[in-house]
Amino acid sequence: MRSRYFVIGLVSSAFVSSALLTGCGGSTPVSPTSPTPPQSSVSASGSAPAVVTEAAPDEVFVGAGDIAKCGMGDPEATARLLDRIPGTVFTLGDNVQDTGSAEEYEKCFEPAWGRHRSRMLPTLGNHDFFGGHGRPYFSYFGASAGPSGLGYYSTTLGAWHIISLNSEIDAGPGSAQFGWLKAQLAASTSACTLAMWHRPLFTSGPNDHAAHMRDIWRLLGQHGAEIVLSGHNHQYERFALQDADGRPDARGMRQFVVGTGGYPLYGRTRSVANSEVFHSDAWGVLKLTLKSASYAWEFVPVDGRSFRDSGTGVCTVPAAQ
């Protein structure tokens, strides 16, 4: 059974809480400063992190994917939502389009979501990868993106183990990424686990299912992970708890597809089992409240849109290995 203790990670819970409370009510929240690499738990190693035996505070984890292309869509509208929501910001890949260039990060992403970069945990998408295997992505996000060139890392946030994976490279058994994840999960002392990668394993959108991530899903499920976040298809979709083969499973993971960061949206192109909510008429962000043994979610639409989705879930104890 995993411990209910929490681990100090890339974003220190106490520091985030105190810094962001200072910014509430202002036009832009005060953000924590990214630590230098030696202080960060963003890691490509399998070593166990240090444990702090305190009750973990609630943490807000908010974001989306498929965000910015100059002259198209509206990343500023979702950035304004982030202005009003304190916490740690995640991205789900395709932070810029189309080529993942440094110029796109400077001119398209930076004026909008860039103002929240110091409190951001990014994920690599296929358009980010187009830029010389992600070199502008790694340069722009720095230590927050983990070791340069890998595209996968992990950290902790309160009681939660947060894992960002790279769906643009091999993720099957025998791959470096799979072996790294297996070691991370074995060493984790966190009560709950959230994984994020760009291409969804399950989706009702036009881009195909990322079948090469199925073994990753299975591995996460074996260790009792709770949530998977993806983008790639430009819509919001929430799935019921399920296993890696798409079968309903009360001990399975809940997947959210949140490709609503600002790029033009896609409609539904298929009917997929276990899809509980689908919406493609509003940009917005997913706000997660991560608790010591549970979580709550809320889709927050941009101003002028009314669609909402909310609910709660609990953390699971992994099945005996």
Image: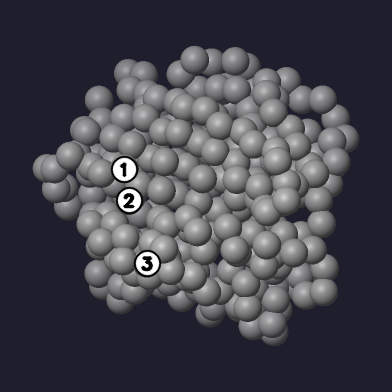
Foreground label between 2 and 1? 1
Asked whether disc 2 touches disc 1, contact meaning CB atoms under 8 Å apart, the reply is no
Give the total of numbered labels. Answer: 3
Query: Judging from the image, what secondary structure is the residue with disc 1 in?
Result: loop
Check disc 1 and report the residue beneath it: 58
Query: Looking at the figure, which quarter contains the C terminus?
Result: top left
Instruction: Determine the residue positioned at 29% across, 46% down.
Output: 158
User: Residue placed at 21% from the left, 33% from the top?
Assistant: 3
Amino acid type, callout 3:
Gly
Label 1: how many Cα within 10 Å (few below 14, some 14–19, many 20+): some
Report helix, strand or loop for mark 3: helix
Expressed as whole percent of the image width and height from the top left, the position of residue 300 reads 60, 45
Amino acid type, label 2: Thr
* First-in-chain label (2 vs 3): 3
294 and 154: which is toward the camera: 294
Q: Nearer the viewer, residue 304 or 93?
A: 304
Which quadrant is the N terminus positioned in? top left
Tell me, yes or no, if residue 211 can be seen here. Answer: no
The CA span between labels 2 and 1 is 13 Å
- The residue that label 2 is drawn on is 156
Is residue 287 placed above or below 239 in the rendered structure?
A: below
Dot 1 amino acid type:
Asp
Query: Which label sits on residue 23?
Result: 3
Choose the circle earlier in sequence order: 2 or 1: 1
Q: Nearer the viewer, mark 2 or mark 3?
A: 3
Image: 104 above or below 11: below
* Mark-to-mark CA distance, 1 and 3: 18 Å
